[in-house]
Amino acid sequence: MGVFATTAEPGTGHEQVVFCQDQPTGLRAIIAIYSTALGPALGGTRFYPYASEADALHDVLELSRGMAYKNAMAGLDLGGGKAVIWGDPDQLKTEALLRAYGRFVESLGGRYYTACDVGTYVPDMDVVARETRFATGRSRESGGAGDSSILTAWGVFQAMRAAAEHRWGSPSLAGRRIGIAGLGKVGRYLTGHLIDEGASVVATDVDERATDWARATYPQVDLVADTDTLIRGDIDVYAPCALGGALDDDTVAALRATVVVGAANNQLAHPGVEKQLAERGILYAPDYVVNAGGVIQVADEVTGASALSASGRYGFDFDRAKARATRIYQTTLRILRTADADGVPPAVAADRLAERRMAEVGRLRGIHLR
């Protein structure tokens, strides 16, 4: 499958896809820019051992499109992009490889800002930033936003409260049973918010280190063997917080939860799943709306350089970013209510709103400025 054929499929239409290779370090990366209608593209770098180059390309195209919609619905003046590094980070990740990658990001001249994602962390962005001005999610010591999973989890929690309000008439999750698939960077923070709220949590993860953490930190969490057991259990809310494609035909058919709100990207395995969810009476909060807290956090690092915070200083301001991430509650509620009013699934309502903002605000770039 060629790049032009892939990006010409309906619903994609990427502006730019760049393949990057540095043989001495083993770097093989793809940077995809879906849209710069609202501003420079912003999206994380995923370091993952894909089975094939085609799988890596498919993932980066899907993820970058999702970032454009996510940034639009988050109210950011930023476009959507994403990058993947093909390989096992435990085997390949080195300073030299990350710096080589940073030089490729720099070569795009600011069309793409990168940040953390699966397989990359704050210290990695500090290394990447040694070669480019366009790396965000750096450490606080380096003037960055730090761990973006903090506000990602906060945003998921707010979206879950909004879904509860829409479904049950109250934003409280106290007494609700929440099933979390994935106790990684976001799932861990989300677990804490839910326990503090008075919810009960059942969770699973393929990594024993994650389940060991849960046993030690929150012994009240029920741990189950796998996701199949989780979704078939007695839960009110299902929270997919691992990799994409979590909602496929079999999962939707077996799911006992009546609400789905999770941090994973690209949760719908294929077009039409959103209709299956609606037909089963399952309320689905669109993933790119729900998990926007992280991009809001790193976006503040980008825009904060020219924005004065309440503390009277320029640069990243956590309180300002958290206040914006808290608005995910209102955004989610607006989408769910719009979906009901229009008689469409929430995913369709969210897409329409995002596309409208990209079209309307993007059009203003046609007004010439001296």
Image (cartoon, rainbow, N blue to C red):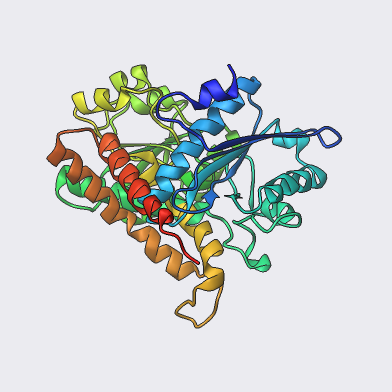
Query: Where's residue 321, x and y in %?
Result: 45, 64
| Residue 70 vertical position relative to residue 136 in the rendered view, above or below | above
- Please report the residue visible at 44 percent of the width from the left and 52 percent of the height from the top: 38
Which residue lies at the image location 31% right of the left edge and 22% below the top edge?
272
190 vs 258, left or right, is: right
Residue at the spot x=42%, y=63% of the render? 322
Tell me, yes or no, if residue 330 can be seen here.
Answer: yes
Q: Is residue 216 above or below residue 318?
A: above
Q: Is residue 206 above or below residue 155?
A: above
Q: Is residue 288 left or right of residue 16?
A: left
Instruction: Please identify the quadrant where the N terminus is shown.
Output: top right
Q: Position of residue 197 (x, y in %)?
A: 32, 55
Closer to the camera in the image, 204 or 144: 144
Residue most extreme to the right: 24
Percent coordinates x, y for residue 357 in the rendering: 33, 49
- Left or right, 231 with reference to 88: left
Identify the residue at horizontal 45%, vertical 30% (top origin): 12
Q: Nearer the viewer, residue 13 or 49?
A: 13
Task: Please state the horizontal and vertical placement of residue 259, each as a whole percent of the image.
Answer: 26, 36
